[in-house]
Amino acid sequence: MILHHGFIWTVDESKPRAEAIAARGDRIIKVGGNEEVLALRGEHTRLIDLKGAFVTPGFNDSHVHFASAASFFWNLLCAKPGDWIDDRGDLKVKTLYTIVGGRIVYRR
């Protein structure tokens, strides 16, 4: 798989940004410019044009504390536009989260 035409944060101080990244299986095999990484593509390589999207290394921790998540989302559904709730789900004005245009947004 090759992700290309993106803004890839490498976490490498000597080369903090790249345009493309190639992976095979569970290994990253090349990080660099679009031209040099795309040169590695084969007949069955999956290409993903990031169209300038940002990529950061990390892992996905998908566990959820059910009661807290349920309370948080319930209060978001019950909140009036412009109300803010905190991450514990308590309805409070101007704390952390609200819904704008159908999306959850937050502020620090």
Image (tube, rainbow, N blue to C red):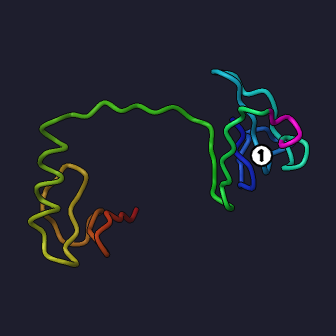
Question: Could you say which is closer to the camera, residue 14 or residue 41?
Answer: 41
Location of residue 82 with respect to 70 vertically, above or below: below
Q: Is residue 89 left or right of 17 when viewed as pictured? A: left
Q: What stretch of residues is rendered in magenta?
A: 38-42
Quadrant in which the C terminus is drawn: bottom left
Which residue occupies 12% across, 48% down? 71
Which residue occupies 74% across, 49% down? 4
Main SS, magenta region, reads loop
- x%, y% of residue 74? 11, 55
| Most distant residue in the front direction | 43
Q: Is residue 46 left or right of 69 when viewed as pictured? A: right
Location of residue 63 with respect to 89 vertically, above or below: above
- x%, y% of residue 15? 85, 43
Q: Looking at numbered disc 1 in the image, what kind of residue is underneath it?
A: Ala
Q: Which residue is mark 1?
A: 20
Count every numbered label the image shows and give the total: 1
- x%, y% of residue 67? 12, 38
Which residue occupies 13% across, 56% down? 90
Q: Is residue 81 magenta?
A: no
* Secondary structure under the numbered disc 1 in the rendered image: strand
